[in-house]
Amino acid sequence: RMLREKDKKREKDSTTLESAFEFPPEYAGYRKKLETTGEEGVGDLFYRSFEGVNTRHALIDGVKAINFCSYNYLDLSGDERVGAAAKAAIETDGTSVSASRLVSGERPVHAALESALARWIGVDAALAFVGGYGTNEDVIGHLMGAGDLILYDSLIHASVQQGARLSGATVIPFPHNNPQALESILQRRRAQARHALIVVEGVYSMDGDIPDLPALVEIKQRHQALLMVDEAHSMGVIGATGKGLSQYAGVPPRSVDLWMGTLSKTFASCGGYIAGSQDMVSYLRHTAPGFVFSVGLAPPLAAAALAALQILEEQPQRVAVLHARALLFHTLARTAGLDVGVASPESAIVPIMVGESEKAARLSRALLKKGVLALPIGFPAVPENKARLRFFLSSAHTEEDIRSAVKALAAESAA
Ligand code: PMP
């Protein structure tokens, strides 16, 4: 009888949840799609458990494949020096500082990382946050407010879109990589707004293309707007020594107000940063809620990012190797008649345009059988019929990896 009472209570609790929260209908559809492992579903491709470091090879269910979705651009995650720095930081400062840096969470490694980032990027100061996503969400949501105007590239990352929504500002996406369209929106809308913020990415993660920074700087100066660049996929990747978009475009780093980046890709850690003027960074340090009211970056993560940055500075050949691999992939893919869309040969992201989402999923499965791991991306992340397979290159790849991957890709695409 007691058991029955318990069951009844459980039933009541679940009824309470159902009546208190209605899952959106899209979620039900999404769940159904995920659970389908047949031709139409992609449930077998995502949320798979990988073994070991995310590097040149991926090991999934004991199967080894050349890994084109590591984001470990310079192969610094898994590097011995980076690991040793993280372990040493645990020994001295523990695994967590447990508190906001405002109170008892500040450690020397935070300042060391931030000053190294600022020096590397070529600006006054930098501030480290606990997540890349959270950095965009918090900083944009905090800097902008009602009466302000946010203009972002229509292909901007979800974290920027979320920050913009939360800010309460008027948000207008402008057509992808189209400075003229941005300019005409500013001509119409700038005068009514208090502040205007333009947000772009250094390399776009869906297409692997690069914005026209000189044009954006000129526009932002003319319209007295702030310019923010998300360097998640450009830091350590583009520019002769991997300094990102300013080096690539030959534009002084101080022309951009907010350089945003993540610590999770090139920097082999976890966290995000903002780099810019002393005034802007100081304002965020004292007022950004996601910084002030959140824990300081974990010591092993700060130390890992700092060690990764030091290696990047000492070993520019890693960047040169990445450039060579990216160019080789582009060249071979084009020669094989594959469609790389608008990707720039300097970026480490090569999309292979496939068309329908289902076809991209099929191609991904077929490649994995041949020992090549690349994941599809389809609707709604990209427009319907613009599904693609994305290849994220790394300095860990050998020339042979690239050649055999493109060969398998060409054979399977033709099949
Ligand atoms: N910005 C861009 C452009 C990204 O692609 C990502 C994540 N891939 C982020 C921000 C968020 O960074 P993180 O994963 O380190 O939170």
Image (spheres, rainbow, N blue to C red):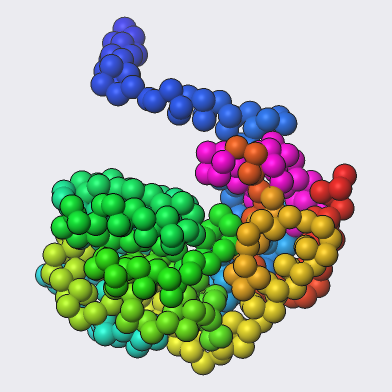
Q: Is residue 404 above or below residue 217?
A: above
Identify the residue at horizontal 34%, vertical 53% (top origin): 185
Q: Is residue 73 visible?
A: yes
**Span colored in magenta:** 354-383
Q: Is residue 372 above or below residue 300?
A: above
Identify the residue at horizontal 21%, vertical 74% (top origin): 281
Q: Nearer the viewer, residue 62 or 130?
A: 130
Quadrant occupied by the N terminus: top left
Residue 17 percent across, percent down from the top left: 29, 22
Number of on-image labels: 0
Q: Is residue 267 visible?
A: no
In the image, is residue 368 part of the stretch drawn in magenta?
Answer: yes
Residue 114 percent across, percent down from the top left: 30, 80
- Residue 135 as seen in the image, left or right of residue 202: left
Residue 324 percent across, percent down from the top left: 69, 79
Q: Quadrant of residue 273?
A: bottom left
Q: Nearer the viewer, residue 225 or 66?
A: 225
